[in-house]
Image: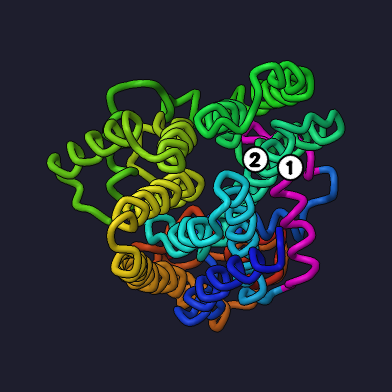
Amino acid sequence: MRRTDWIWAAGVVGPAVALYLAAGVTGGFLAAEDFQWLTTARDQPPDHLFAFAGHFYRPVVRLWFAGAVRVCGDSTACYHLLNVAIHAVNGLLLFAVTKALTPRPAVAALATASFLVAPGYVETVVWIACLPELLATALFLTTALLVLQVWNRPNAARWWIAAATAMLAVFAHESAVTVLAVLPLVGWITRRHRPENLRRVAVPFLLAVLIFLTTAIVSNRSNPVFTESHYRPGAHMIIHALDYMVSMYVGPHIWPAYVFAVLSVGAIITAGPTLARAGVIWMLLTMVPYLGFTWGNVSRYQYLPTIGFAWIVAGLIAALHDRLAVRWATPARVGVSLLSAFIIVRFAIFTAKGVKERLDWMEAYRTYAHAISRDSRPADGVTLLVPTPQDPRVEADYIQPMLRWTLHAPALEVRVGR
């Protein structure tokens, strides 16, 4: 990117980071799966990094946590800062990818700002256990940037590098496999590739798919998510998709909002501006892997699809400006600037509230952990009896890894219900 592009990017990434810091993210504790990831990274031998454990295979995330615990130690603020840092990097990558699709830095900046302060996925940035979504998105965007750079300038080495980053993305989170469908379609809609270049992608990307499928089958043979039918096709996928779309613009979860979302998507696909159409494709395709879960929607799963939503916002506002500027150049610029500011500020307000809610949830774990630590100093390897948490937000399944982490007792056994 040129120097002016870096200035535009820093101008939107900096305030977004400041928003999370001002909301108090570094003062947060840990919660739920955080303790499992961190105790495993701290206490398990190195061979766990690439072991198949009957669950999702995410060696990239394990490697990240193995390094993080050695850098951060017991500092929860450090882990939160790492999450915010990856979020900022994703903003820079998104700006670069958007700039590759449109020559207008203001449009790329608006898309990046819309993504960085979007309220729907707040827990992804605040909750340490959401690192897979953050890392997968960073690698997904890196792949997109590499591919967009070589669509019209074929380079065998870069194709292989792009395939490697795509494979790393799926080894951070399986949902990133949608990169194989998203990028060709985005390239086609934006006319950024030549059809004959798809053959050049075939070998490296098909090899990446083969490696992913092999490890996915081996690692998930006994995964309860699949063996107990927590993930399956069905009509629930449609409702999940509608709920995700409504959540992105912080709308009400009622049928009129669902109808509005469907009509809007249809109108954009049919006659919308190019960037908005690419955004619809990105949003819908990256959403697909999350729709099969039979439980309710999960906030963190909106992270990657929200990039598509941000493109929709930026594309529509840019098209509005272009239409109005034909007759009223200055009023169009002022009006579009005010509209953009309104959207970003509205999102930022909801995001700040969302950060506080997540921090309050983590505080419940801190309060319980401190109470146990104050009253008990068990030796490692013994069984500790602890009372049932009075706060329902503290789940019993996570108390043992939590106390193993806070008490530095990797062999501690915990029984809840004293």
Circle number at residue 59? 1
Drawn side of residue 328 relative to residue 115, left or right = left
Q: Nearer the viewer, residue 225 or 240?
A: 240
Please state the extent of the stretch shown in magenta in the rendering. 48-73
Along the line of sight, the residue nearer the viewer: 365 or 60:
60
Residue at (78%, 44%) from the top-left corner?
48
Q: Identify the residue at image location x=70%, y=31%.
A: 151
Looking at the image, residue 134 sits to the left or right of residue 350; the answer is right
Residue 54 among magenta residues: yes
Q: Position of residue 98 (x, y in %)?
A: 56, 49
Q: Which mark is residue 335?
A: none
Q: Indicate the secondary structure of the residue bearing disc 2.
A: helix
Q: Amino acid at mark 1?
A: Pro
The answer to which quarter of the image holds residue 393 is bottom left
Q: Is residue 270 above or below residue 165?
A: above
Point 74% across, 39% down: residue = 165
Going from N to C along the chain, the mark reached first, 1 or 2, is: 1
- Position of residue 289 measured from the top left corner of the image (x, y, whole percent): 48, 32
Q: Specify the quadrant of the image occupied by residue 279.
A: top left
> Which residue occupies the foreground of this view, 346 or 87?
346
Question: Disc 2 residue type?
Answer: Ala
In three-dimensional space, the C-alpha distance between marks 1 and 2, rounded to whole angstroms, equals 21 Å
Quarter of the image with the C terminus is: bottom left
For marks 1 and 2, give the one nearer the viewer: 2
| Residue 368 part of the magenta-drawn span | no
Residue drawn at point x = 49 percent, y = 25 percent = 226
Find residue 223 and report its horizontal and vertical position in percent.
Answer: 56, 29
Dividing the picture into quadrants, the one containing residue 240 is: top left
Dot 1: what SS? helix
Residue indicated by mark 2: 144
Rendered location of residue 84, percent (x, y): 59, 67
Residue 17, placed above or below residue 225: below
